[in-house]
Amino acid sequence: MLVDGHGLPIAVVVASANTNDSTLLEATLDERIIHPDYDEKTHLCLDAAYDSRAIHAELSIRNITSHIRSRRKEKQLKKLHR
């Protein structure tokens, strides 16, 4: 599920429970009901599971700025909040 800045759903893709979420990113972006103009910068916040070259490349092609916390940063934050 993809939501806008207010938490309203703008795309949904259904898959089996054992499907890795990152493999569904492209399909989810294709299903958006709201498409910004190409020259309008879009931002997308994702968790560390999406931190890969393939994901960054796909988002770059779509003119989307990614905000993905690296796996290293996630581990550091988990240690701080124990």
Image: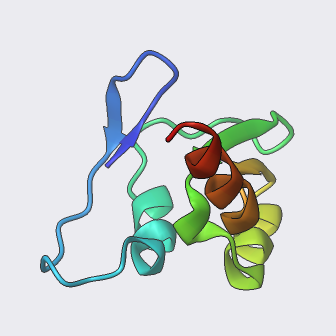
Foreground: 72 or 42? 72
Quadrant hosting residue 62? bottom right
Q: Is residue 39 above or below residue 14?
A: above
Quadrant hosting residue 7? top left
Horizontal side of residue 33 vs 15, given as left or right? right
Horizontal side of residue 20 vs 30, given as left or right? left
Foreground: 24 or 67? 67
Q: Is residue 49 above or below residue 16?
A: above
Horizontal side of residue 52 vs 82, given as left or right? right
Horizontal side of residue 27 vs 43, given as left or right? left
Name the residue: 38% across, 56% down.
Answer: 31
Foreground: 61 or 66? 66
Toward the left, the furthest residue is: 16
Q: Is residue 30 above or below residue 57?
A: above
Name the residue: 40% across, 73% down.
Answer: 24
Q: Position of residue 12 (x, y in %)?
A: 27, 52
Name the residue: 13% across, 80% down.
Answer: 16
